[in-house]
Image: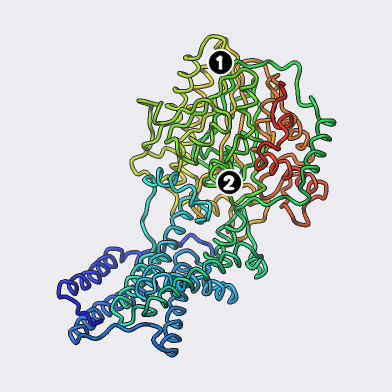
Amino acid sequence: MKKQISPRALVFKLISPAIVIGILIFYRDLFFGESLLKNVKTEVPLENVRPLVFFVLLGLTVVCAADSLRAYFASLEGREKLTAFRSPLAGIFTVVIIFLNAILSFYEIELINNYYILKMKLPYVILGWMITFVFYLFFTFAFNSLKVGMCTGNILFLAWGIVNYYVQRFRGIPFQWIDFGSMGTAMSVSGNYDYTPSWQIIAAIVVTVAVCGFYLHARTDRLFAGKSMKIASRGIAVGLFIAFHIVIFRTDFLANTGIWLRDWQPWYTYRLFGMESGFFAFAKASYPKMPEGYSSQEVARIIRESKEENAGKSADPDAVIPDNIIVIMNESFSDLRTYPNFKTSEELMPGIDSLEENTQKGTLLVSVKGGTTANTEYEFLTGNSCVLSPATVVYNSFIKQDQFSLARTLEAQGYKVVAMHPYGPHGWNRDTVYPRMGFDTFLNIENSFEGADKVRGLVSDKGDYEEIIKQVEAKEEGQKLFLFNITMQNHSSYKNEKFENTVDVTDFHGANEGQAEQYCTLLKMSDEAIMELLDYFRDKDEKTLILFFGDHQPEIGDDFWEYCFGKSIDDLSFDEQQKEFETTWFIWANYDIPEAEDLTLSADYLSSYLLSLTGLESTPYNDYLLAQRSLIPAMNSFGYYDEEGRAHEWDTEETDPEAAEKLREYKCLIYNELTQGAARDDTFFGLDHS
């Protein structure tokens, strides 16, 4: 079919290059100014050629404009559009074009995200080419159009690369399969971040616009003519999709190529093996696998032996039963003094440091950093570690039925159970998950916190704790209360220019200095707020037990963590890496409880430990977990601490055989509780009040 380009369409096509040139000029400092990677302690050769890249992109844009003119004058001749597979030779040429474009897209997304791009091994580079190639073939055959398929692919890969860049930048871990289930949560806090692009993003946008322009101007469009061939084209697309799914998700193809997962540093896997390969490797690992040796008989054996060995051992007959149990999981709260080089101009938590009387405190090992609060929350409430599926947000993926939890255990003993979070109810699927956890009430920004004090647009810890006081004062006389509260004040990002930083980070002058100082200022505010809450309860008649802990460390930037460690993050040992998964906790009461400090726990043990101080009845599962502490004092998804405080990575030669067997049994229990529904042993995971 012969079709001419209208003058109006030509004007539109010429406007696009003009806009691109405007973008290049607007962001010229990214190419000629100081490198944003100046604090990365590794050689990044591409940073030295940024000015040259700028002029190449400028030239490419001019060529695009010229090609628009060429296409316009060619259309005046009324040239007929051609099918891509009109002959075997034309078909081969089309496939070659698609493959070359796949290579280009692979390098675009790696350029955006991977400053190790020139160090990637050739087999993984080729693997990345082929994954991209399959995607392009799928789109092209699905649309039976070279123009639509290739433009779709180019835009998709550009968007994928940019999304991964910002997720990595804001959260410290790259975009993963599990993030599709938390888009709502991500969008709800997206306004808090700085979206200034990198020069690589600008370069990728320019290249994508240019490539799409060339396809739009090409005479070749449809792959096949005729109805039957169009149907065949869609059939090829479906076949490609099915084959790709089988190879990636139903076989060990990726693992057999040598790709391995560094669960605690997903970005390392992405940079080593490529963003696409890393993404799909983690996607495959995001589904819970049945543990080795799992069976209903094995679970029954573990439960039987645990009940025989551990029944009642965790109970303290002299402990006082509190009227109020208040748990505060404080957003991004952590004690960075665990790092050798970290110092500030003033003490960040003098109040918490001063707590001694009727207080226990120490270090908490968690499974996440920089985000995914819900996994720490899940570990605490259920006692189930995320070791079964570290690449999964459990709230989004697995909570499809009622779960046993601390809330159910306390409700069975007469407590009113309330969850509280001063933000939207849908984040991390909480409005669905909390009822399945046993919470009767969920206080959130839509039904509470009216007029609450705010910091950086978020409800402050002070405002949050005032709502806690309201709930305690509003309850019926004699009613016992369990309140599980997640704060919001310290949520990233830490680039709010209207917020006054009052704390200096000593000797740190990197690109993320402002973020570090804002975070530290917020920590100091958190310390002041929690002390005000403790002062309120100190002289109250009702016996109140308060647990305070951080969900994870913040994500600030590589240069800050290299300052904290005093070395490149690429050179950290596993023991050092585990420090990035440590937060802090304390338990305080306004009545007599045993005092202790420097205790190391993990999030999956913490609720059981809390119960052991209350005089309340524990479940046999709580007893099991506290008994497990004698062998594995603290653990997360990636490893554990032994009795001497040394870190050991799971499934390596460092893993003690006895600890490995205990982990296997623990995984069997977690899998059973999480997935088996009515087949679970209610008398083990819950209280048997039948």
Q: Residue at x 39, y 30 (%)?
A: 446
**Residue with the mark numbered 1:** 538
Whether the residues at callouts 1 and 2 have beta carbons within 8 Å, the answer is no
Disc 1 crowd rating (10 Å Cα; few below 14, some 14-19, many 20+) is some
Give the quadrant of residue 685. top right
> How many numbered badges does the structure rendering display?
2
Instruction: Please state which of residues 396 and 124 is positioned toward the viewer in this rendering.
Output: 396
**Residue with the mark numbered 2:** 368
In-image side of 556 versus 585 (left or right) = left
Q: Secondary structure at mark 1?
A: helix
- Please, what is the three-letter code of the amino acid marked with disc 1? Arg
Give the quadrant of residue 156. bottom left
| Residue 429 sits above or below residue 594 on the image | below
Distance from disc 1 to disc 2, alpha carbons, whole Å, reads: 33 Å
| Place of residue 172 in the rendered image (x, y in percent of width and height, measured from the top left) | 51, 52
| Place of residue 224 in the rendered image (x, y in percent of width and height, measured from the top left) | 39, 80
User: Could you tell me which quadrant the N terminus lies in?
Assistant: bottom left
In-image side of 229 versus 329 (left or right) = left
| Residue 326 sits above or below residue 558 on the image | above
- Please, what is the three-letter code of the amino acid marked with disc 2? Val
Q: Residue at x 44, y 61 (%)?
A: 160
In-image side of 39 versus 588 (left or right) = left
